[in-house]
Image: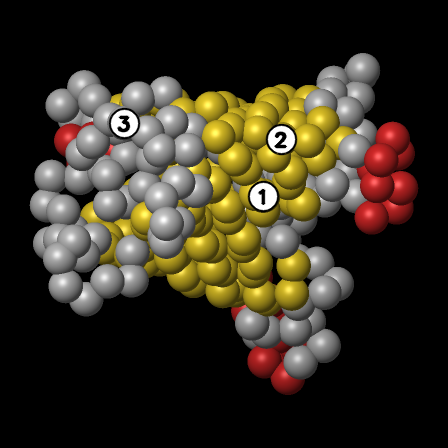
Amino acid sequence: AQAVMPGDPTPVEPSALGFHEPMYFLVGGKDPVSARFQFSFRYRIFDEQGVVAETIPVASGVYFGFTQTSLWGLQGESKPIRDSSFRPSLFYRWGLDDPDQRGSLALYGGYEHESNGKEDMPSRSIDTLFVLPVWRTEFSNGHTLIFAPKLYGYLDKEDNPDIQRHRGYVDWKLRYGREDDWVLATQLRRGTSGHGSAQLDLSWPLRRPLFARTGGFLHFHLFKGYGESLLDYNLDRGTQVRIGFSMVR
C-alpha cells in the first residue's frame, strides 16, 4: 500500500479512514542497537454523503491525521522505548489537476502538533502551520517521480527554541520508482545554522515472492545528521542504518 501524503493527488477517497504516512518496523542502528517503528492514519471528517459535505462540498477535503514514530532500545535489561514523537494534524487537501493524467498537482495545508508526550524534562514539542504541494509525474516506463516540499512556520517552540537551527523551515521530499517494484524516497533538512539531516528509504515489494496477497515490503532505511527524533533535535548520533518490513510505504 502507498501512503496518502505525499503521493496521492486525489482530493477525497471512498473510505473515510485510510493511510497517511509510511508504516514500518525496522531494526539496526548503533550505540545502542534499536528498532524504529512508525504507524500512521488519516480520517476524512466530513463524508461526501453526509449533510455537511452535501451542503458545503468543499468540506469533504478536511482531514485529521495522526503519526507516531518511536525508537526502541533493544539492548539492556528493560529494553526501553527511548523516545516517541506524536504528530496529530488537521489539514485540507486540494486536488488541483486530474489525477489520471501523467502529470498532476495537489496541495495540502493545515496545522500540526509534534510532541514526545512528556510533561517534565526532557519535554519536547512544537506547533506548526504547513503547506505541502505535491507534484507527480509519471514516465512512459511506468516509473513515477514525486516532489513534495513541506514548508512550515513555527507557532510555538518554547521547549526547543532553537529547533530551526537544526531542522529549518522545509522538509525536501523526493520519491521515485514503481508501485509494483522498488521505490526510493528521500527527505532532506537544512537548518539556519547549516546543520541538518538526510533520510533515505528504499523498499521492494514482497507480495508475490513471499506474502502472496497480504502485501508488504522489504525496507532499507538510512538516517544521517541531526534530529532523528524530536528529543535529539540538536544532536547528531551518527549514521543509523536499519532494515525491516513496511506495510505502507
What number is the disc on residue 24? 1
Provide the residue designation for mark 2: 219
Q: Position of residue 35 (x, y in %)?
A: 47, 40
| Between discs 3 and 2, the one toward the N terminus | 2
Whole-angstrom CA distance, mark 1 to mark 2, is 8 Å
Instruction: Mark 3: give few (<14), some (14-19) or many (20+) Cα within 10 Å.
Output: some
What number is the disc on residue 237? 3
Whole-angstrom CA distance, mark 1 to mark 3, is 21 Å
- In the picture as drawn, the residue positioned furthest to the front comes out as 77
Q: Secondary structure under badge 3?
A: loop
Say which quadrant the N terminus sits in.
Answer: top right
What number is the disc on residue 194? none
Going by the numbered disc 1, the residue's amino acid type is Tyr
Q: Can residue 65 be spotted in the picture?
A: yes
Cβ atoms under marks 1 and 2 closer than 8 Å = yes
- In the picture as drawn, the residue positioned furthest to the bottom comes out as 51
